[in-house]
Image (cartoon, rainbow, N blue to C red):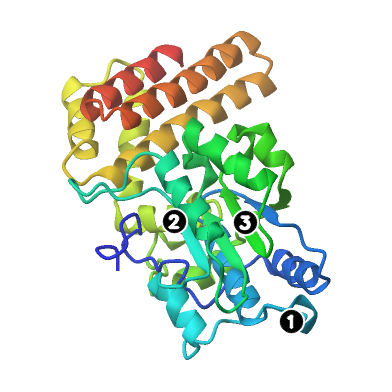
Amino acid sequence: MSEERPGILDGAVHPAEQTKLFGHAEAEEFLARSYRSGKGHHAILIEGPEGIGKATLAFRFANHVLHHPEPADAPEAIYDPSPASPITRQLAAGASHNLLHLTRPVDEKTGKMKSAITVDEVRKAGKFLAQTSGTGNWRIVIIDPADDLNRNAANAILKILEEPPKRSLFLVLTHAPGKLLPTIRSRCLPLALSPLSEADLSAALDSLDAAPSGPRAGDVLSAAHGSVSEALKLVNYGGFDIVEAFRTIVEAPAEPPRRDVHKLADVLSAKDSDTVFSFFCQHATDFVTDTARSAALSGDLSRADRLAQLSSQLGERIGIAQGYNLDRKQTIISVLDDIRASL
């Protein structure tokens, strides 16, 4: 699966192929009612942490709309897609003429996904929306996620949202709505999703045959914070070992051996290590943010301010390193050194 769909984690199913939705029943009911009323918004901003089912919900809603192009005739609920339906099969294969999944493109030279959604990709959306559907059906664009739009692409999307074609629907996904252009947010109807409960997360993992077992099963459900993708990284990508090595280094009472620092950096910067590198970067940033919050709550405002600034700096540095393909090992070492110096 992951070989055919770049960016899909080992053990995961592409959202277009997923027939079940775990959690988010209220959000799905809202979408069904809103569409059936005929007064649904042309652009919906589906917000929430990564890996909780935003894209799955978007594809399910798109499937619902394409099966019931006349809102008044649509059922009051969104049902599990039927694998026997031609529309469902086309969506799963990425071959629907009525849906465009706008995401980071694959670099033809490396076979890996690029670091951003570019304006060239958005131009494809413009051409897609300009085509007249032979069936009179809807044109649906799923932007997954809008956080990956570079500035030019974001501005190009904004122009389309300002004057949307008739019978067009935009499902805009975001892990961090505060980072989007305010003008994009203002043209969308926000729909916030919460992290999955441990019961829903466990059910989702079980459906993927990835349910954690053994003494760490409970730890996986707790540490994943309601995210299927985080759970898969913990189980299938050595996430626990990365977290343990990170904490051993940054929380060591004395200067940690440089060999330990380099060993972790070597693992995270090895060939085909995109997933574990991103996992480390997110964990490191979250660790600093959480530590800053704890310092503020305890009244140590000076330390809280220092760590808050570091969190912002780390996010910027990591973004630059990923965007310009800078040396990952050096990035990791400098991140570890800066965190230790600020604690």
Which residue is painted at 37% across and 53% down in the image? Answer: 234
When asked about the image quadrant of residue 38, the answer is: bottom right
Residue under numbered circle 1: 74
Number of marks present in the image shown: 3
Mark 2: give few (<14), some (14-19) or many (20+) Cα within 10 Å: many
Q: Which mark is residue 339?
A: none
Whole-percent x and y of residue 10? 31, 62
When asked about the image quadrant of residue 198, the answer is: bottom right
* Distance from the alpha carbon under mark 1 to that under mark 3: 19 Å
| Mark 1: secondary structure | loop
Q: Residues at badges 3 and 2 in contact (C-beta under 8 Å)? A: no
Residue 333 appearing in the image: yes
Nearest to the observer: residue 306 or residue 252: 306
Question: Amino acid type of disc 3?
Answer: Phe
Q: Residues at badges 1 and 3 in contact (C-beta under 8 Å)? A: no
Q: Residues at badges 1 and 2 in contact (C-beta under 8 Å)? A: no
Q: Nearer the viewer, mark 3 or mark 2?
A: 3
Q: Which mark is residue 170?
A: 3
Residue farthest toward the top in the current orientation of the protein:
302
Which residue is painted at 42% across and 47% down in the image? Answer: 121
Question: Amino acid type of disc 2?
Answer: Ser
Nearest to the observer: residue 277 or residue 137: 137
Q: Which mark is residue 229?
A: 2
Question: Amino acid type of disc 1?
Answer: Ala
Query: Does residue 59 appear left or right of residue 79 in this picture?
Result: left
Mark 3: give few (<14), some (14-19) or many (20+) Cα within 10 Å: many
- Sequence-earlier tag: 1 or 2: 1
Whole-percent x and y of residue 107? 26, 46
* Distance from the alpha carbon under mark 3 to that under mark 2: 24 Å
Relative to residue 272, is residue 343 depicted above or below?
above
